Amino acid sequence: MKKPLLFAQELVKNTVKEGEIVVDATCGNGHDTVFLAQCVGAKGHVYAFDIQKEAIISTEKRIKSAGVQERVTLKNVSHAKREFWPQEPLAAVMFNLGYLPGGDHAIVTKAESTVAALQIAINSLKQGGIITLVVYTGHPGGKEEYQAVRDFCTALPQQDFTVLEYQFINQINYPPLLLAVKRL
């Protein structure tokens, strides 16, 4: 069985085609940004968001090291600000909720902004597109954020979307879980 992050990447890789537009809604240290840039190829584009300058700097180093910086636009703003999202239909949006690994654990994603960004992602998703949310609940507010995101996803109409929840239920220390939303 795959860890939720690896399963999220598998779902995205099976959905995204070369030349498409995608979003990394929480770029963190840039791992998903590089992954997405490789998925879209030289003709595609990745928009990557993070509110922490430290995350943007880390992602910038990682994309330069991978040689994919020409296909990535970094945004040091909240993913909840619609005016910074691309106008084109999106093939995929990836979220990693929680805190920046190696960063300040007091700075975490919040239910309100995550649900706002998820609404933007839903409205921007093309037919057949996918949204993945790897959710970490072990920090203050993490369980509440998960519940808000899960409630949002549960309310999506089944004639338009399929929603998957994937998690390990016998592990300690708040293992991450995955929510995935696919537009039909």
Image: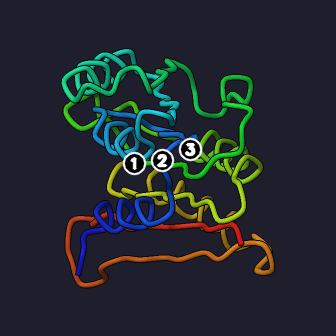
Relative depth, front residue between 114 and 95: 95
Relative depth, front residue between 27 and 104: 27
Crowdedness near tag 3: few (<14), some (14–19) or many (≥20) residues, C-alpha within 10 Å = many
- Give the residue at mark 1: 39
Q: Is residue 75 above or below residue 17?
A: above
What's the residue at 77%, 49% (across, down)? Answer: 123
Q: Is residue 16 above or below residue 184?
A: above
Q: CA distance from mark 2 to mark 1?
A: 6 Å
- Give the residue at mark 3: 20
What's the residue at 62%, 68% (across, down)? Answer: 182
User: Decide: marks 3, 2 in contact (CB < 8 A)?
Assistant: yes
What's the residue at 49%, 22% (across, down)? Answer: 73
Badge 2 amino acid: Glu
Q: Percent x, y for residue 178?
A: 42, 67
N-terminal of the pair, mark 2 or mark 1, is 2
User: Decide: marks 2, 1 in contact (CB < 8 A)?
Assistant: yes
Mark 2 against mark 1, which lies toward the viewer?
2
Q: Secondary structure at mark 2?
A: loop
Q: Secondary structure at mark 1?
A: helix
N-terminal of the pair, mark 3 or mark 1, is 3
Q: CA distance from mark 3 to mark 2?
A: 6 Å
Relative depth, front residue between 30 and 127: 127
Name the side, left or right, on which 158 lies relative to 67: right
Crowdedness near tag 1: few (<14), some (14–19) or many (≥20) residues, C-alpha within 10 Å = many
Q: Percent x, y for residue 74?
A: 46, 21
Determine which of the numbered discs, if any, sits on residue 129 in the image. Answer: none
Q: Is residue 60 above or below residue 145?
A: above
Q: Secondary structure at mark 3?
A: loop
Asked which quadrant contains residue 170, the reply is bottom left
Crowdedness near tag 2: few (<14), some (14–19) or many (≥20) residues, C-alpha within 10 Å = some
- Give the residue at mark 2: 18
